Amino acid sequence: MTVLDHRHHTALPGWLPGATAPRTDPAPLLPDPAPVRVLGTPALEKYDPALLRELYRRLVVGRRYNQQATTLTKQGRLAVYPASTGQEACQVAAALALGAQDWLFPSYRDTLAVVSRGIDPLEALTLLRGNAHTGYDPRAGRTAPLCTPLATQAPHAVGLAHAARLSGDPVVALALLGDGGTSEGDFHEALNFAAVLQAPVVFLVQNNGYAISVPLSAQSAAPTLAHKAVGYGMPGRLVDGNDAPAVHSVLAEAVERARTGGGPTLVEALTYRVEAHTNADDATRYRNEAEVAAWRERDPILLMERSLRELGVLDDALVQEAAEEAEALAARMRAEFHAEPELDPMSLFAHVYAEPTPQLREQAAQLAEELAAEAEVQH
Amino acid sequence: MAQALNSALRDAMREDPAVHVLGEDVGALGGVFRITDGLAAEFGQDRCLDTPLAEAGILGTAVGMAMYGLRPVVEMQFDAFAYPALEQLFSHVAKMRNRTAGRLPLPITVRIPYGGGIGGVEHHSDASEAYYAATPGLHVVTPATVADAYGLLRASIASDDPVVFLEPKRMYWGKAEFDPAVPVEPVGRAVLRRTGTSAVLITYGPSLPVCLEAAEVAKAEGRDLAVLDLRSLVPFDDETVCRVVRSIGRAVVVHEAGGFGGTGAEIAARVTERCFHHLAAPVLRVTGFDIPYPPPMLEHHHLPGVDRILDAVARLQWED
């Protein structure tokens, strides 16, 4: 695939010289209107079979993770879970497109991307379980906390990528967003900063059709979300978000481009949220079953399984192996989450400031007294 | 004060290559108040970065820079221009240490020129300290002397926690010379700027000179007012404030922001809770009105002046 040269300057006739002239010919920045597809095309044969098997394995384990987490919400073991069922290809490919030194900036639906990055699957769930905000060490795993306010992590990705580049480190930041997030001001400010600073950052918008209940048609009037890149002076790419090798290759190319000084890229992955927004949502109020059924036919695991079997890189042994790994993870989730977590109330005061203020010391002492009094009553 | 702030930035950047300044017009222009004058020339545009005009983007970018180990110093051009960045400030800057159980502290200093008295049109004169002080995870600091402008800014940049650094913009051009030899009290300690026995005026930032002037006038009228400069709203120096109030027995809190839900309400409540039996009168507040900041030709009616302060002092149930 060709790396787009977005710095290609063209002097258009009729423009005044200097600052008013367009800096970039927009044509190379525009996304190809047909989303990139790999599964079911001859391009698949060029892919590393080991990568394809790894993508498949992670899809299967990820699907089970989504299902088990959703079940745990019904049992009251998780406070909430925004499932990425049907979007696993985006999540898995996002993590696999990054190197160990790169940073991932996930939003709240991206737990699976975090897990696929190598973070412990249970530590990745503490936010949604309700026992801690971030259960993993962001620095060790180079993965920012799951971000709940929409798109606010996007400028963080830009700043980190910018700082890394200033330090001379070949680090790329990948920010994950949803279609709803593209309406937020922080999304636009992040894209603009990234393009102006030429920061080594990639934005992946998982367009799953709905921002809670609002369909994309009521969210954006742009031809595609990838088109939004052009206005900022960066390339936009469109990819089939249910085609794991396609997402991986488009992201890997964008990551490589960023790493070698080519600046940021906006990628839109077309996918679908087959489950409700969260366990607390009733999706039947805003969409019909026929639409969901049509997307179930385009399930990322089904597509992958069909193509890989045809190609001869997937056999029953791998299917069995992936299923067993998935069940083992689900069993571990059940075992761990059915036990009550050990929580230390005094940890409330531990990380507000580097040094607690005198006011927090007083309040910590108050809580300690309350706890002592409770313990007294229980004895 | 502008020169002291500029020196603080320059010295911090010289001593620590991790210190980066970013904001609107901070480069070639040196900031609209010239606080960053000469920094881009000395340290290059990477370390004194003219950003696109977008406050959430500036502060959000600073968050990522701090996550990678830099010490960003953000300039917000005017107090009310910081509001687009409040989500970044409240949801991320203030909380990142807590969200990550101490693993991602954010050593960011957010410099905000604040307050009125310079004849600015709307959106250029807000006193917004109560919003910041009410947000756990932020330090809130405001200098009222030239020495503090230098010392508190150096301390803020050196802090491993985010600091909202409020610069009283009407004091930028004060006549006091900056003397680096003047020692600076640490952040979090209030300083008695004037001793007195009749009542204590508790204040900070742009209201300090007004209180000192009021104390001069009161002296001519036979009242001996102490003036306490808080310097830091978070952390708050309960110890010094209570010691002074207990020894004098009468207190007035003075600030230019509106009174309702303002820092004066918090201070009066804290003092009352802790010093009730030492008080000879209720703690009074002298503040701006609870109105959007007025047009500049009317601002002198809004800002607490000497007369309003002395009227409050007179209402402290004098026995003499």
Image: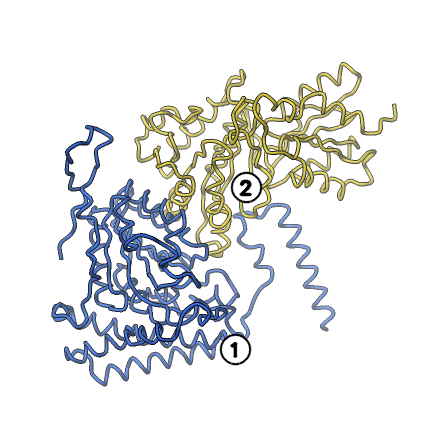
Chain colours: A blue, B yellow
Residue B208 drawn at (x, y percent) = 63, 25
Residue B72 quadrant: top left
Q: In this rendering, do the residues under marks 1 and 2 share a single chain?
A: no
Residue B183 drawn at (x, y percent) = 55, 26
Amino acid tagged 2: His
Residue occupied by mark 2: B139
Residue A19 quadrant: top left
A225 over B159 or under it: above or below: below
Left or right, residue A278 beside residue A303? right
Residue A11 quadrant: top left
| Farthest-out residue, right | B319
Element under disc 2: strand
Left or right, residue A283 beside residue A24? right
Q: Residue at x 46, y 60 (%)?
A: A134
Between A194 and A162, which is closer to the camera in this rendering?
A194
Residue occupied by mark 1: A75
B168 over B130 or under it: above or below: above
Amino acid tagged 1: Gln
Q: Chain of mark 1?
A: A
Per the model, the C-alpha gap separating discs 1 and 2 is: 41 Å
Q: Chain of mark 2?
A: B
Left or right, residue A206 beside residue B235? left
Q: Residue A63: give its label.
A: none
Residue B253 drawn at (x, y percent) = 70, 32
Q: Residue at x 75, y 17 (%)?
A: B219
